[in-house]
Image: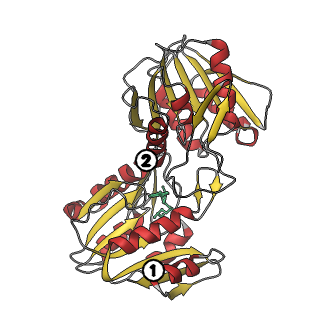
């Protein structure tokens, strides 16, 4: 993996997080980062005292580059926050000058610069633009960037709707800049998130913050897994990669005296999962824990784990990968008690059976349909 970011006479070592999962073709920065750096350096060479909001800096390339500014790093991703911290440390840059906040919080500063990496999920962008309205002024410089194919008319319409007149640069290295001149808002427009849907059986009303997986309806894999849950009575279950918490809700509803730990790397997912338990099964709240974590790294072992349930992700930001699923399986194995079960659902073409066999020595197929298989491994 190329970790040496040599650009405009400056050199940084930049890693993805977690560092141990690397691939020769991966990098922790991209051409959109380079365009943003070029643009900001051209327009304000000295950024030392500038208040800069950096949104969705996936691995901390921009946060490291502009470290002499007063930076507020805003992201929904715990992994992105950890990556930025790692890269600041790797480059002996001070971490104390950077404030880390998640995408549900509004920073308490009036920024000179707002620098946005346009996220894959437009809903997250919309929520972030809506939030920016209350802290920017007509003097705030707003610049965003992404791959050309990720900047659609609908993307630009969102900037226009919430912030002001929006233009774009020419494409360079398949990426493009977006410039937005803020207007004084006649009235603030509210973010349309969270959104709500109901489960088919009408048991639950599911609320979803902007960046939550299956924001508009239940995921089809989750639907299958709900029909093949293990017996969770009197057990502690970890809902790993919980999203809005729908799997954990069915466990709490269907099984007596169980405890559930909801885990996700998305702050919005954990906030939604917690709200959904409070809202649908208030009396079960004391049986639950909610943890923002990379896989199970931040989950304490205070509660012995009987079952880990998982509908794993198969990409990190824009990269298709099974490395997160693999780390989830490894972490599950180390957290589970002897005799405990990891139950997962995955697309049939993925290599999960092979991974489980290697890790646990075997697996059982609990159910499958045309697209998915539910697999179980016992520690
Ligand atoms: C396929 S979704 C499943 C969501 C939910 N369990 C469902 O079935 O609807 C995978 C989830 O894993 C989360 N995730 C991705 N990377 C993660 C990581 N490194 N650690 C913890 N959770 C992660 C995503 O935010 C997402 O909510």
* First reached walking from the N terminus: tag 1 or tag 2: 2
Q: Which mark is residue 227?
A: 1
Identity of the residue drawn at 67% across and 24% down: 9
Identity of the residue drawn at 19% across and 61% down: 286
Picture quarter containing residue 352?
bottom right
Q: Is residue 65 visible?
A: yes
In the figure, 88 relative to 114: above or below?
A: below
Whether the residue carrying mark 1 lies under 8 Å from ligand 1 is answered with no
Q: CA distance from mark 1 to mark 2?
A: 31 Å
Give 9 or 197, whichever is nearer the viewer.
9
Drawn side of residue 36 relative to residue 110, left or right:
right
Picture quarter containing residue 330?
bottom left
In the figure, 72 relative to 319: above or below?
A: above
Residue 367 % position (x, y): 52, 86
The mark closer to the camera, 1 or 2, is 2
Drawn side of residue 32 relative to residue 110, left or right:
right
**Could you tell me which quadrant the C terminus lies in?**
bottom left
Drawn side of residue 80 relative to residue 34, left or right:
left
In the figure, 247 relative to 193: above or below?
A: below
Identity of the residue drawn at 26% across and 81% down: 233
Residue 244 % position (x, y): 42, 57
Q: Secondary structure at mark 2?
A: helix
Q: Is residue 218 visible?
A: no
Residue 152 % position (x, y): 72, 38
Whether the residue carrying mark 2 lies under 8 Å from ligand 1 is answered with yes
- Give the residue number, with chain letter if any, for mark 2: 78
In the figure, 196 relative to 44: above or below?
A: below
């Amino acid at each position: 993996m190329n970790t040496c970011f040599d650009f405009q006479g400056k050199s940084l070592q930049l890693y993805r997080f977690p560092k141990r999962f690397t691939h020769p073709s991966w990098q922790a920065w991209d051409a959109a980062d380079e365009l943003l750096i070029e643009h900001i350096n051209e327009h304000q060479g000295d950024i030392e005292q500038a208040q800069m909001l950096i949104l969705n800096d996936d691995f901390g390339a921009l946060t490291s580059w502009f470290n002499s500014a007063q930076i507020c790093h805003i992201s929904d991703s715990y992994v992105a926050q950890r990556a930025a911290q790692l890269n600041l440390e790797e480059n002996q840059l001070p971490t104390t000058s950077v404030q880390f906040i998640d995408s549900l919080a509004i920073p308490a500063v009036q920024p000179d610069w707002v620098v946005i990496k346009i996220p894959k999920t437009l809903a997250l962008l919309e929520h972030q633009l809506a939030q920016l309205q209350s802290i920017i002024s007509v003097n705030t410089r707003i610049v965003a960037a992404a791959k050309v194919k990720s900047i659609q008319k609908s993307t630009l319409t969102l900037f226009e709707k919430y912030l002001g007149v929006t233009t774009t640069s020419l494409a360079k290295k398949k990426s493009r800049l977006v410039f937005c001149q803020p207007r004084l808002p006649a009235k603030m427009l509210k973010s349309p998130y969270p959104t709500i849907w109901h489960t088919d059986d009408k048991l639950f009303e599911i609320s979803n913050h902007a960046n939550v997986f299956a924001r508009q309806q239940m995921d089809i894999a989750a639907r299958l897994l709900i029909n093949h849950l293990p017996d969770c009575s009197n057990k502690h279950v970890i809902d790993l990669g919980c999203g809005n918490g729908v799997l954990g809700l069915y466990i709490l509803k269907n099984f007596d005296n169980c405890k559930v730990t909801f885990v996700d790397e998305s702050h919005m997912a954990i906030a939604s999962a917690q709200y959904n338990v409070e809202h649908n099964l208030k009396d079960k709240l004391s049986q639950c824990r909610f943890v923002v974590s990379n896989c199970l790294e931040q989950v304490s072992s205070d509660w012995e784990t009987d079952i880990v349930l998982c509908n794993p992700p198969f990409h990190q930001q824009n990269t298709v990968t099974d490395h997160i699923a693999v780390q989830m399986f490894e972490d599950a194995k180390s957290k589970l008690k002897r005799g405990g079960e990891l139950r997962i659902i995955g697309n049939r073409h993925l290599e999960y059976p092979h991974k489980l066999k290697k890790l646990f020595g075997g697996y059982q197929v609990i159910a499958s349909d045309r697209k998915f298989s539910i697999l179980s491994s016992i520690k």
